[in-house]
Image: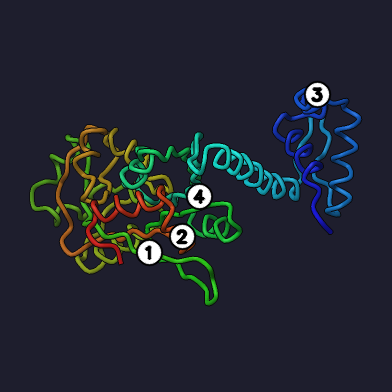
Amino acid sequence: MDLNYQYLRYFWTVAREGSVTAAAKRLHLAPSTVSAQVRLLQEELGHPLLERTGRGMLLTEHGEVVLRYADDIFALGEELLDVIRSDGRPRHAYRLKVGVATNLPKTVALRLLSPCLSLPDFPVHLVVSEDHAEPLIGAMSVHHLDLVLVDKAVAIGVGSQLESVRLGASGVSLMAAPAVAARHLVDFPRSLDGAPMLLPDSGSAMRRLLEIYFADAELRPHVVAEFADSALMKAFGRTGRGIFPVPSLVADEVAQEYGVVELGQIEGLAETFYAVLVPGRRANPAVSAILTSARQIFGSIE
């Protein structure tokens, strides 16, 4: 069975516009024509893609999957036409789809991704998704993402077309609002025993590093809260709720942005960052810019 791309475009337009009527207006067609074409696509695929609700339409589970593929298909089609019409040089921005693991510090992600937006002669439209590492890698394996940034090594199965690249490592610093820091600066890090602590959730590499460190040093901080979102953890820390960890390489930026101070760096701890990509993507100018920025931030890339 060959996919009918005309049917797919009509479905895609209905999904994006939210109703058959709105899609028909956008396509300059009768609503009955659009409905018939979408119905034929559903018959071809063997699954319902849309459910009527009130005056609009809702995507089914299969509809969500088809929509994601349709987004990619039509974006690539526009990019192809753009490149051909402009003698191989894109007039419009290249869509780079990047996944950022929830636990990856946002300041690190910003430093890694920013250079791809300043490439001469290669405009980039950056599309960033945030989730836990496993769903992001799954999305990448079916070509919904070009690159995934994670805070821990990811197991790549035998025969997989994905590659895990170690970007580099950073020491770990503890930060807090000035009033909280003042109470725990003396005799650091022994002062952490019983201190209020804000921690990343149990799925993060930073959390595991800290738990091992606290156990080895026989320290028992009071965990006030734990967070999947590193930015929210910093926001709580700014209000004086507790001490929180950050990669040392961005400690100065965090201090300036959140009005907090650094208690100190934990000796012997280092958080490692990785990128997961399709090996052939290394040559892409946008991906290359991200890997080059990592080399400048962390040192050599393995």
Distance from disc 4 to disc 2, alpha carbons, whole Å, reads 16 Å
Distance from disc 4 to disc 1, alpha carbons, whole Å, reads 19 Å
Verify CB contact (< 8 Å) between mark 4 and mark 3.
no
Verify CB contact (< 8 Å) between mark 1 and mark 3.
no
Disc nearest the viewer among 4 and 1? 1
| Mark before the other along the chain sequence, 1 or 3 | 3
Distance from disc 4 to disc 3, alpha carbons, whole Å, reads 38 Å
Distance from disc 1 to disc 2, alpha carbons, whole Å, reads 8 Å
| Mark before the other along the chain sequence, 1 or 2 | 1
Residue type, numbered disc 1:
Val
Q: Secondary structure at mark 4?
A: strand
Which residue lies at the image location 79% right of the left edge and 33% below the top edge? Answer: 57
Quadrant that contains the C terminus? bottom left
Q: Which residue is mark 1?
A: 165
Residue type, numbered disc 4:
Asp
- The answer to whether residue 236 shows anywhere in this view is yes
Q: Name the residue nearer the viewer: 118 or 179.
A: 118
Q: Which residue is mark 4?
A: 131
Disc nearest the viewer among 1 and 3? 3
